[in-house]
Image: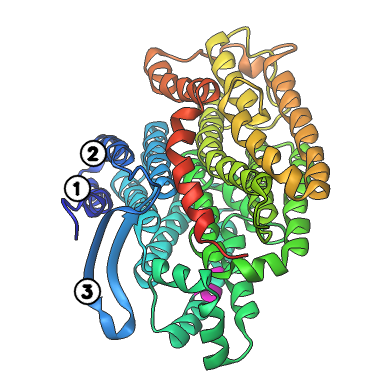
Amino acid sequence: MSGFPVLTLLTVLPLIGAAIALMSGKHARGVAILTTGACVVLALFVWTQLPANGSIGLVEVHKWAPSLGIEYHLGVDGLGALMLVLSAIVTLMSVDAAHRVHHQPGLYFGLVLVLESGLFGSFTALNFFHWFLFWELSLIPAFFLIKLWGGTKRGPAATQFFVYTMAGSVALLVAFLAVFVATRSMDFQHLTLLASTGELEQMVTSHLGPVTMWLAVGVLAGFAVKVPMFPFHTWLPAAYAEAPSPVTMLLTGAMSKMGVYGLLRIAVPLFGHQIAQMRTPLLVLAVATVVMGAWAAAAQKDLKRVFAYSSVNHLGYCLLGIFALAVPYSLGDAGQLASQAAALNGVILQMFNHGVTAAALFWFVALLQQRTGGHRGIDDFGGLRKPAPVFAGLMGIALFSSLGLPGLNGFVGEFLIFRGAFSLAWVASTVSILGLLVTAAVILTVIQKVFSGPVPEHCKGFPDLHTGERMALAPVIGLMLLIGLLPQLIVDSVNPTVQNLLAHWRF
């Protein structure tokens, strides 16, 4: 272990808060706000301590079960630290939005905090056994949050969510058990080093036969469910629609990023060569995720389902960037390396930006439901800019961020992804432009139907945001503007990690 165990503290703090919240009854939300607020501060501190060369920092290592390749190994680079900050911010937003939980509030907020601990553990663990524990830990509270506090169809939605994610986890577990049998290691850094020289594939082949490609498929399937990637996305609309909106904020803002993170931390570093061999079909699936997600969003009438399919579309851009850069590097081709770096920077920035924006949109849906007795149909509203101009203005900024308007955070990540992907996979990138066009039509339709036209009878007394809500939403909207205008605040810290990752990946 090196220095003060700040990553361990960050992971354990939500669990302590959860234990206190369980015993706090009606005061559980206050405990959760204090805990998540402290986690935001600690995550930002971690962000300031990143090594300048983009390597793994704040490392903690303890022997656990050496004979089984298991050790307590933590560390973060720019990718992991940014996901910690995102998870902390989104969880605080979710707790702030959940001020009408009257049924077992102690259990509700306790589960939210356990979920936050699972997120932190997943983004800091560097040993598969340790990482897998937190990967699964995040699934359990999410299931119960949907099952116990969701809508009328919460039972089937929670079950589908659990079954899909568990199936992906089984695929991951089987693949990594095979890797362990061949290498006697579960350490991500060590396995990445073996993969970068081609030794990992040789060891797997010598012990198990020519199964490396199948192991890569299993790992990809596990993460594809979590992202989710077409056609593994069918659990998402029901889960997002039936979960309470504050829980949906966690699902889309943070949990979906675990899948993309897993691709960047595990799948590409260990199986980059196999992914490069499957590049064309993977690009087809990424394009399908982008385009079909956008078209599906356009066909929805429920606002939560609109934004659910929109999330599939936006995460499809991350998949496009990852699979586009999976091309062998030609020595001396500086342009190709620059394109790969641009695409990877865009993917990481898109993960953060989408997390903040999508969580904010579902927060606004929660506010709409609270003010109208549960209405959330796209045709249930109209003319809300008249009775609630501040609400309309702030939600409009979040919607334009989702649309990708220049000057807001949603634009920067997508621009970098396409900047890199066009020179690496121009056909896939060109077709994916359809997703941008359809998304623009979807978002503008939402703005028109919710904020323009005559005010329905049940919306004439629609209250505008009160002072507390404005103060809670202001930092989130401010963050969208800040990153949109000064993306270098993130990119300058992430780019060394990008260069470091690309230097160790073998396609």
* Along the viewing direction, whichever of 203 and 236 lies nearer the viewer: 203
The reply to whether dot 1 and dot 2 touch (C-beta < 8 Å) is: yes
CA distance separating discs 2 and 3: 34 Å
Which residue lies under the disc numbered 3? 63
Q: Amino acid at mark 3?
A: Lys
Name the spot of residue 75 as percent of width and height, x first: 32, 56
Quadrant (top left/top right/bottom left/bottom right) for the N terminus: bottom left
In reply to whether residue 169 is colored magenta, the answer given is: yes
- SS of the residue under disc 1: helix
Q: Amino acid at mark 2?
A: Val
Which residue lies under the disc numbered 1? 20
- SS of the residue under disc 2: helix
What residue is drawn where x is 63% and y is 69%? 273
- Horizontally, residue 299 falls left or right of residue 477, namely right
Q: Nearer the viewer, mark 2 or mark 3?
A: 3
Please report whichever mark, 2 or 3, sits nearer to the chain's N-terminal start. 2
What residue is drawn where x is 58% and y is 23%? 408
Q: Residues within 10 Å of mark 3 (few under 14, many from 20)?
A: few
Please report whichever mark, 1 or 2, sits nearer to the chain's N-terminal start. 1
* Along the viewing direction, whichever of 423 and 222 lies nearer the viewer: 423
In reply to whether residue 107 is colored magenta, the answer given is: no
In the image, residue 487 above or below residue 19: above
Q: Amino acid at mark 1?
A: Ile
- Horizontally, residue 220 falls left or right of residue 109, namely right
In the image, residue 279 above or below residue 468: below
The answer to whether one can see residue 97 in this image is yes
Q: Residues within 10 Å of mark 1 (few under 14, many from 20)?
A: some
What residue is drawn where x is 74% and y is 40%? 297
Disc marking residue 31: 2
